[in-house]
Amino acid sequence: MSSKNTNRLNVPESRNAMDKFKMQAANEVGVNLKDGYNGDLTSREAGSVGGQMVKRMIESYEKSL
């Protein structure tokens, strides 16, 4: 199995905005993220950050309807 990272942003200039969004979501759920590598997070912590991001994206979409 390859460990090549296939996560690519469609708009490369959006990387800073996505990093800021991720940090805000982490703060909301009480996970302490740092800039750069965060491989020391538990699966539960990483999942809660991702889940919070998805929740906020869905809320934003629903408000735009």
Image (cartoon, grey):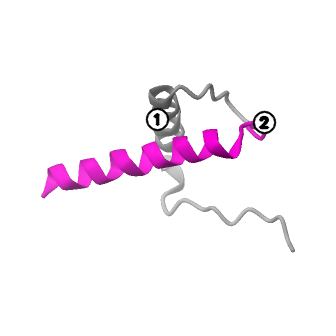
* Residue located beneath label 1 in the image: 25
In the drawing, what numbered circle is on residue 8? Answer: none
- Asked if residue 40 is positioned above or below residue 60 in the image, the reply reads above
Nearer the observer, 25 or 5 = 25
The amino acid marked with disc number 1 is Ala
Dot 1: what SS?
helix
How many numbered marks does the figure carry? Answer: 2
| Residue appearing at x 50%, y 63% in the figure | 10
Q: Nearer the viewer, residue 18 or 56?
A: 56
In which quadrant will I find the N terminus?
bottom right
What residue is rendered at 49% in x and 44% in y?
A: 18
Using residue 44 as the reference point, say whether residue 2 is left or right of it.
Answer: right
Which residue corresponds to the image point at 54% horizontal and 59% vertical from the top-left? 9
Q: Residue furthest left?
A: 65
Residue 7 percent across, percent down from the top left: 63, 62
Tell which circle, 2 or 1, labels the residue nearer the N-terminal end.
Answer: 1
For mark 1, does the 10 Å Cα neighbourhood hold few (<14), some (14 to 19), or many (20 or more) residues? many
Q: Quadrant of the C terminus?
A: bottom left
Q: Which residue appears at 47% of the width and 48% of the height?
A: 51
Q: Which quarter of the picture shows residue 41?
A: top right
Q: Magenta segment, principal secondary structure?
A: helix
Q: Which residue is disc 2 drawn over?
A: 40
The magenta span reads: 37-65
Badge 2 marks a residue whose secondary structure is loop
- Label 2 is placed on what type of residue? Asp
Magenta stretch: includes residue 6: no
Side (left or right) of 20 relative to 2 = left
Give how far across and how far down residue 30 sits, in percent. 53, 25
